[in-house]
Amino acid sequence: MSLWEKFKQVLNTLKENFVFTLWFMIVIWAVYFLDCLSLGYLSRFGIHPWDFKWLPGIILMPFLHKNFAHIFINSLSLAPLMFIALSYNQRTGYNAIVTIILIGGLGVFFLGTGDNHIGASGLIYGLIGYLMFLGYFEKSLKAWFFSIPILFFYTATIFLMMIPVEGVSWAGHFWGFVAGVLAAKILYKKSENANRFSW
């Protein structure tokens, strides 16, 4: 493959990652506006620990938000983290998102407290954990290239996560982060065998 063809492949991959991230955000915002129109009816469908009739909340939690400030702040964090995770390895990035939602959601469902957990912050903390630990598990230069900036910018955020705040799903943050670290461990592959683009 020529240098130009490789460059075009990189651009095409980045474009696909951008489009996926954009559509994910569009869905989240569409659900929020539908929830506003329904006067908050949809936001009831979050995770209710140990209440099995609300089990679908494990999947729905990242798409539901309490108010404009909630979804706006989450969007600012989620979009770049998702794009970065997909840009490291597109296929593994998709799997990491699913893994974080499922494992993080199950953690909240079985070990969380409170009534109704909603919001994409669990996925956000999951992506932070995933990207932070890529370098540790993969032990490749490229993995550390992605992990070190996340460690630099988000280490303080992880410590703040440990401080309980009323009205904030501490369990969602914690189990999301744990799920992200597990995703990095479960999904990583040796650099020479991984299907990644190279710069």
Image (cartoon, rainbow, N blue to C red):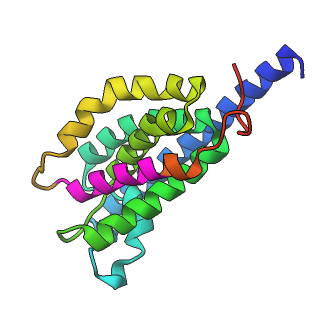
Q: Where 24 sits versus 17, above or below?
A: below
Q: Which residues are magenta?
A: 168-182
Can I make out residue 44 in this image? Answer: no
> How far across and down, in percent of the image, does residue 168 sit?
18, 53
Q: Nearer the viewer, residue 91 or 147?
A: 147
Quadrant location of the C terminus? top right
Residue positioned most to the top: 3
Q: Where 143 sits versus 100, above or below?
A: above
Can I make out residue 59 in this image? Answer: yes
Q: Where 50 sits versus 194, above or below?
A: below
Residue at 43% across, 62% down: 103
> How far across and down, in percent of the image, does residue 47 sit?
31, 69
Residue at 18% across, 46% down: 162
Q: Quadrant of residue 56?
A: bottom left
46 displayed left or right of 9? left
Q: Quadrant of residue 191?
A: top right
Quadrant location of the N terminus? top right
The verdict on residue 153 being magenta is no
The verdict on residue 175 being magenta is yes
> How far across and down, in percent of the image, does residue 59 sit?
45, 66
The rendered magenta stretch, by its main secondary structure, is classed as: helix
Residue at 41% across, 54% down: 179
Residue at 25% across, 51% down: 67
21 displayed left or right of 161? right
Q: Where 19 sits versus 118, above or below?
A: above
